[in-house]
Image (cartoon, rainbow, N blue to C red):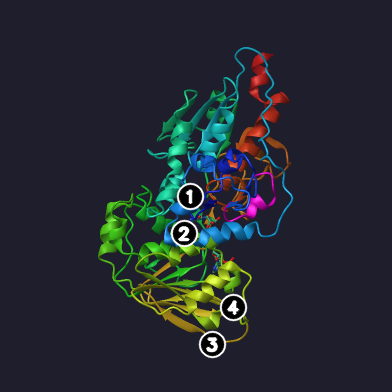
Amino acid sequence: MPHAVTQSCVGDGSCVYACPVNCIQPTPDDPAFELAEMLFIDPSTCVDCGACVEACPVDAIKPERSLEPSELAFLEINAAYHATPRKRPTLAPVPPRLRVRDFGPGTALNVAIVGSGPAAMYAAEELLTIPGAQVTVYERLDRPYGLVRSGVAPDHRRPRRVTRQLDRIRQHRRLTMRLGVEIGRDLTHPQLLERHHAAIYAIGAISDKRLGIPGAELPGVASATEFVGWYNGHPDFADRSFDLSHRRAVVIGNGNVALDVARILAVDPETLVDTEIAPPALEALRRSKVEEVVVIGRRGPEHSSFTLPELIGLSATEGITLAVDPADLPRGTADDDAKLELLRGLSARPRLGRTIHLRYGLTPQRIVGFGEVDGIELTPTFGDGPASTLGAGLVLTAIGYRGVAAPSLPFDEATGTVPNHAGRVLDPGTDAAVPGTYVTGWIKRGPSGFIGTNKRDAQETVRTLVDDHNAGLLRTARAAA
Ligand code: NAP
């Protein structure tokens, strides 16, 4: 009986290395890994050993017999990936080992990591494979793990289990965690480099892209970053309040963040009781009058930014009707795209209870209202057509996160990232490396991918750092001189 990877796959590749027959694809060395929405088990070669189940940090892999009815679709999704046979080695790739030059006593690497989200912790894990290496993680908040705690929706219980994996890394005896220390406020970058041979910044993308349309400053318009921070009890957003007294809320953008906020607005709040949702948010949701959440995509359904696993999860959420207008779907008889096929199925369902309505091909023009939001004016993105106003008491923008400049580090305003090559921070004026300074995660590559994507990313940054150490470019070598 084959196993299947399900919705909560975080894509860190742990299962790939555990599988004795290399039946989980794509593997981290495959270019397709970067773009894959999840990993897929080949049912025809799975030997049902369960090694992947043990290895998965978030319990996303199950044998067929244990799948919930709402997860059965994942059997087909796993199989479909392998329907076209691809040549692959019989054994999974082995991650390349770090080769670290020994400069003698007192020169073992001592690295600072700024931030404690998955990108930071995966960098620490990789560094700790180096004999004697010391790692200090600096986190500005009094709780670790960044977006795993402050970004993942509370009802996404399995992805949140990645904290167990991060806890194991944190417990390493050569790792020190310093909570409540902000670089730039409590310690400067030069001070950090006096104490450590190198610093890796894993500070994520803590702000968000702005819609930049008239009316966006009206009370009742907020970013998904604020809303997500609020329901997850992030101290920066804990005192926010959101007007949930109107029938309709609008979410702009249709990525996975948009689906998360739409689901939290629409789900029965009692299903959130035993989650880590912030108590004031739960109370506010209990009083909510929102009955319809409209999720606006500016392009067509074939360009929906959400992933198929998240759409399947949402479509199976009890008490929520997920609606799509048939007119928004491309004409034709058959879809070879699983997302479109599922959307087509949704378009035929009757609407009952609280609804999340996925709309397409609409560009926001302005937010309307006097003193507070009354609605949003939209025009068709393609072709001519009249503007229409959709009434709403709350408009949340979920159009992507954005990195914020860190004191003493160069910053690219256009991408919201720190200029770098394979994690080595570069001075944009001269293209020269900024000594001892590295980046990983969203501040390095922008806000894309899943929790596990940061593992490969962190491994690349640590390899770059070790290359610089081996080349004598870090203080490790000077200490030996
Ligand atoms: P995203 O996937 O990049 O989606 C952004 C959305 O905003 C897109 O629909 C985009 O449309 C739209 N948009 C951008 N600018 C716009 C504008 N000016 N006007 C209207 N719409 C605009 O970003 P995200 O949802 O913030 O997610 C960030 C990353 O976190 C993703 O990799 C995501 O998968 C990950 N994440 C994963 C999960 C999960 O697995 N459960 C949960 C949350 C986040 P266009 O496509 O037309 O640009």
Q: Nearer the viewer, mark 2 or mark 4?
A: 2
Tell me the residue that label 4 is attached to: 381
Q: Nearer the viewer, mark 3 or mark 2?
A: 2
User: Within 10 Å of the Cα at label 1, are there few (<14), some (14-19), or many (20+) other Cα atoms?
Assistant: many
Residue 354, percent from left and from top:
35, 72
Callout 4 touching callout 3 (CB < 8 Å): no
Tell me the residue that label 1 is attached to: 62
Q: Answer whether residue 173 is magenta in the image.
A: no
Look at the image and give the residue range highlighted in magenta.
Answer: 28-39
User: How far apart, in angstroms, are the residues tagged by discs 3 and 1?
Assistant: 50 Å
Dominant secondary structure of the magenta stretch? loop
Question: Earlier along the polypeptide chain: callout 3 or callout 2?
Answer: 2
250 or 34, nearer to the observer = 34
- Type of amino acid under label 1: Lys
* Residue 71, numbered label: 2
Q: What residue is drawn where x is 49% and y is 80%?
A: 325
User: How far apart, in angstroms, are the residues tagged by discs 3 and 2?
Assistant: 41 Å
